Image (spheres, grey):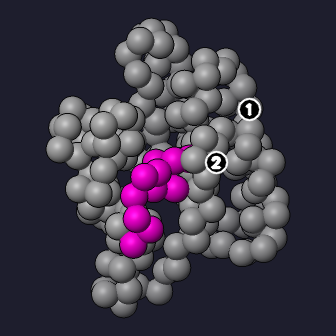
């Protein structure tokens, strides 16, 4: 499984062995699941950046699954929802051309961006997932994590080590069912 994400999947500020991707891989290995996670996430990544890197990643790794965790940085920069939509669609088209199954993670936008923008983005993820028969999974930054200072770094944006373990538990449930 190729993970194409931003700092949330790249493990911003967290030692590599405690990042959610590594923790999920350890759980998969312990349960003898034959799934290797390839983390191609970059801090600051946008849907456009992920799209530009994807062809080489697909050719280099030939994954069976593509886990897309992108769009939060687009939202932070106030990029138009239509741009996020078109980039996600193109990412999914590239994956489908290679017969790669798609998992899309819903993103959560901070309330200060307004209800309309937040709702538009939510609909885009649902629409793209439906269009490409992709599995849509809830955001890793659910209220349990974001509202708990014991699970977040001081920046209030990124999960800390404890948050990584909560995310790993949540995502393992989705990933282990593949």
Image: 13 above or below 99: above
The N terminus, quarter of image:
bottom right
Q: Is 100 on the left-hand or right-hand side of 173?
A: right
Find out whether residue 115 is within the magenta segment: no
Find out whether residue 16 is within the magenta segment: yes
The earlier-in-sequence mark between 1 and 2 is: 1
Q: Which residues are magenta?
A: 6-17
- Residue drawn at the location 82% of the way across and 64% of the way down: 56
Please say whether residue 149 is visible from this viewpoint. Answer: yes
What residue would you read off at disc 2?
132
Image: 53 above or below 1: above
Residue in front for this viewpoint, 55 or 163: 163
Please say whether residue 68 is visible from this viewpoint. Answer: no
Q: CA distance from mark 1 to mark 2?
A: 13 Å
Residue in front for this viewpoint, 122 or 142: 142
Residue in front for this viewpoint, 8 or 4: 8
């Amino acid at each position: 499984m190729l993970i194409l994400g931003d700092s949330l999947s790249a493990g911003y500020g967290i030692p590599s062995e405690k990042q959610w991707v590594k923790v999920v891989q350890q759980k998969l290995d312990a349960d003898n699941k034959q799934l290797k996670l390839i983390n191609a996430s970059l801090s600051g990544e946008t849907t456009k950046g992920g799209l530009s890197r994807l062809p080489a990643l697909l050719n280099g790794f030939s994954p069976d699954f593509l886990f897309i965790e992108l769009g939060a940085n687009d939202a932070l920069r106030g990029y138009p929802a239509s741009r996020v939509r078109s980039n996600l669609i193109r990412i999914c088209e590239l994956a489908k051309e290679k017969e790669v199954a798609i998992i899309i993670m819903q993103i959560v936008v901070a309330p200060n961006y307004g209800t309309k923008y937040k709702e538009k983005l939510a609909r885009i993820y649902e629409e793209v997932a439906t269009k490409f028969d992709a599995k849509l999974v809830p955001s890793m930054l659910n209220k349990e994590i974001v509202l708990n200072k014991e699970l977040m770094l001081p920046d209030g944006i990124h999960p800390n080590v404890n948050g990584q373990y909560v995310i790993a538990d949540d995502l393992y449930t989705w990933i282990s069912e593949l």
